[in-house]
Image (spheres, grey):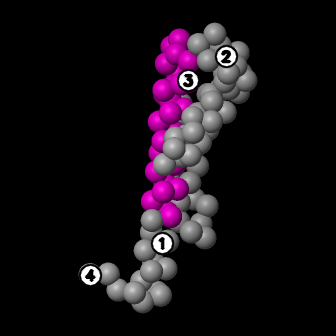
Amino acid sequence: MRSNKASNIKRDIRAKFQRAVNSFFEELNTSSIKITPIRTGRARRGWRKSGKYRIGDSGVMIENQVPYIGLLDEGRSKQAPAGIIMPVLRNLNRKRNRL
């Protein structure tokens, strides 16, 4: 049985919030990989997520250091004419709004 103590409730809320944020970043990374145009596979392999989100510490980052990722994100590929990040964020937002 869960305790009603304020400190336990606060701890549970923090933990759930941190899990939700980390889940969002995992899904953002995975979705970015899936939508990235593929010719050689270099841009898809370039996506990296590092760190975990903790309240008070912004230690999570998603990046792609492939030199031409900016062009792909601007929609310069026929495979992803709308880019990468904005379509992924719109899709994640739609999924979250359905919950």
Residue 80 located left or right of residue 26? right
* Magenta-drawn segment: 17-45
Residue at (52% x, 56% y) in the render = 21
Q: Quadrant of residue 1?
A: bottom left
Please name the residue that numbered disc 4 is placed on. 1
**Closer to the N terminus: mark 3 or mark 4?**
4
Secondary structure beneath disc 4?
Answer: loop
Label 2 amino acid? Answer: Pro
| Front disc: 1 or 3 | 1
Q: Quadrant of residue 88?
A: top right
**Closer to the N terminus: mark 2 or mark 3?**
3
Please name the residue that numbered disc 1 is placed on. 13
User: Going by the picture, which residue comes out furthest to the front?
Assistant: 98
Residue at (56% x, 18% y) in the render = 37
Please name the residue that numbered disc 3 is placed on. 36
| Front disc: 2 or 1 | 1
Image coordinates for residue 42, horizontal then vertical, percent? 52, 21
Please name the residue that numbered disc 2 is placed on. 81
Considering depth in this image, is 68 or 33 the residue closer to the camera? 33
Q: Quadrant of residue 84?
A: top right
**Closer to the N terminus: mark 1 or mark 4?**
4
